[in-house]
Amino acid sequence: MDILLMGPPGAGKGTQATLLCDALGLPTFATGNLLRDAVRRGTPLGQQAKAVMESGQLVSDDIILGVIRDELDAPAAANGVIFDGVVRTIPQAEGMERLLAERGRRLNAVLFFDVPDAEILGRIERRRGIEGRADDDPAAVAIRLQSYREQTAPVLAWYEQRGTLVRIPAVGPVDDIATRVRRALAEHGS
Ligand code: AMP
């Protein structure tokens, strides 16, 4: 089963991805985590992505599709993947569809974590205090939210047209949201 988690920065995708990983026994894959790790280790990928990430802008579609291809070719991903924040532009959505189709797969569900803007800013501010991410500073957050609205929000309509998008109200206790996610997958995850 391949599941895509979407939503603005700070929507709680990572938290729910971890819970789903335990429940379904599938690996999670977050391009943000992979890229941060590459930057920390100073790999060629990290060197390419560092400045763009720190500014809050999106890394190029070619880079992202390359890392998605590598992930899909990993043996651990053979039975499906929980993709956390991996598709952020229409070309990425098209590329992901193609890469999955080449392997006889498709996204079984796209879960959109719906959180009001005011709540998001508060969550990112709290996370900055805990994780100290360079791209959680106010200037970078503003750019991340802008690229979300301009480039990622249209992807929701793209999936909606294909009938794979499920909207999850993502405010409230983590366990309540996890229950909504399980129900959504039971009803729509085919
Ligand atoms: P995240 O941890 O998911 O907020 O990602 C941190 C940063 O990594 C983003 O602000 C982007 O610069 C980059 N990034 C992560 N995933 C993608 C993606 N699918 N497309 C483009 N850039 C990405």
Image (spheres, rainbow, N blue to C red):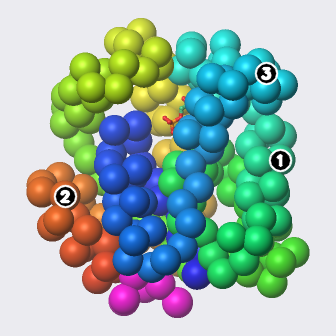
Q: Is residue 17 left or right of residue 12?
A: right
Q: Is residue 72 left or right of residue 126?
A: right
Does residue 112 show up? Answer: no
Magenta stretch: helix, strand or loop mostly: helix
Q: Residue 88: where, in percent of width, then height?
A: 60, 45
Q: Quadrant of ligand 1?
A: top right
Answer few, some or many: residues within 10 Å of disc 1's Cα (few below 14, many 20 plus, some between 14 and 19). Answer: few
Question: Which structural element holds mark 3?
Answer: helix
Q: Are marks 1 and 2 in contact (CB under 8 Å)?
A: no
**In the picture shown, does residue 27 fall above or below 121?**
below
Residue corresponding to mark 1? 66
Start-end of magenta stretch: 185-190
Q: Residue 64: where, in percent of width, then height?
A: 74, 43
Find residue 138 and report its image quarter. top left
What's the residue at 29%, 82% (across, down)?
Answer: 183
Find residue 43 and report its image quarter. top right
The answer to if 186 sits in the magenta stretch is yes
Q: Residue 47: where, in percent of width, then height?
A: 77, 18
Residue corresponding to mark 2? 174
Q: Residue furthest front?
A: 41
Residue type highlighted by circle 1:
Gly
In primary-sequence order, the first of circles 3 and 2 is: 3
What's the residue at 63%, 40% (across, down)?
Answer: 34
> CA separation, marks 1 and 2?
32 Å
The answer to if 92 sits in the magenta stretch is no
> CA separation, marks 1 and 3?
13 Å
Residue corresponding to mark 3? 48
Question: Which structural element holds mark 1?
Answer: helix
